[in-house]
Amino acid sequence: MKTKTYRVGIIGCGRIASILEEDPLREKPCTHAGAFAAHAKTKIVAGCDIEPERLKTFGAKWGVKRLYEDYRQMLKREKLDIVSVAAWTEYHSEMVVEAARAGVKGIYCEKPIAVNLTQAKRMIKACDENGVAMVVGHERRWDKRHQVIRELINSGEVGPLRSITGYTLTGAWPKIPRKTYGGGPMFHDGTHLIDLFRFFGGDVEGVAAQENRPHGKNSVESTVTGILQFKNGASGLVIGGGERKYFHFELDIQTERARFILSNHVSKMYAADKSKRFTGFMELEEFPFPDWSGRVNPFVGGVDDLVRQIETGAESLSSGADGYKALEIILAFYRSAEKGGAFVKLPLR
């Protein structure tokens, strides 16, 4: 029996869509196009970008001849099964809605899902009404290391979750309008971090936060320090931004009996054991990290998730609803900071 091949069109041919594949240090694939090219059931047949030279380069790299500067023309002329939305966040909503109404079967939307909750709701509604599967590109959910730790927590093997501390530290941001761009480092990089907080800890009851906006309240933030209260009783602390001379992304997950540290290059596990230093005390000692063999590239995992949704109706590991809730938490941070750090309950009104 011949394997079904899904026809893919990519909107936005920039950094996360294609250009990062040129980075010699990154694991490949590391882009939307790279993942679709690597998956056995998908084929890139069209691309769209408003910059002609970038579009030409994209076409040459991936062997795509059907190139457009207007995504609406691409949707109209090409019989696409899947659309990848890798344009700027402020355009996600209109592009996802148009694609859903154009008759595609699935949409892979880059993170953050949208600039605001109204846009995100519109996207989810359009996909639901037209029977379109959607994945939001928080690709760390398909990282086997994260999945193994989540399974340990959910099984109760390491005791209940007590706290999560997370960092997404970056350099200083320029003066950028908040209304158009949505937010700064907490919004664009921190969305991965906040999504993983929910991945491990479940839904959030509410948040409190402080922020620094050196360019004024109408520009994006430089730093957000936020506290989260999970519905299961666990707590969270997150720092996003921070004007550092380096990039650092890290999770410190602590349960009743264990601790896990996960970053882009670190995987460590500690467990409670009899202290070698103090009589009658238990301390954390480092143990081998749990087996995470059978790993799949996270970007390919996202494409596979979308294909599985299309073929079986299975729920996504990174759905539109998940993308919405990550965005909601970040916007709740901003609201709390505007109110002097007051506790803000979820869902937002």
Image: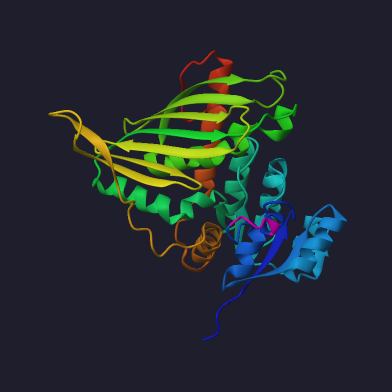
Relative depth, front residue between 295 and 347? 295
In the picture, measured across the screen, residue 222 lies left or right of residue 257, that is right
In the picture, measured across the screen, residue 124 lies left or right of residue 93, that is left
Relative depth, front residue between 246 and 126? 246
Residue 25 within the segment the image draws in magenta: yes
Q: Residue furthest front?
A: 277
State the residue at coordinates (54%, 61%). 306
Relative depth, front residue between 198 and 79? 198
Q: Position of residue 341 (x, y in %)?
A: 51, 16
Relative depth, front residue between 31 and 258? 258
Q: Residue furthest left?
A: 280
Q: Height in image: 59 above or below 270?
A: below
In the picture, measured across the screen, residue 103 lies left or right of residue 165, that is right
Q: Height in image: 25 above or below 93?
A: below
Q: Position of residue 1 (x, y in %)?
A: 51, 86
Q: Quadrant of residue 91?
A: top right
Tell me which segment is drawn in magenta.
Answer: 22-26
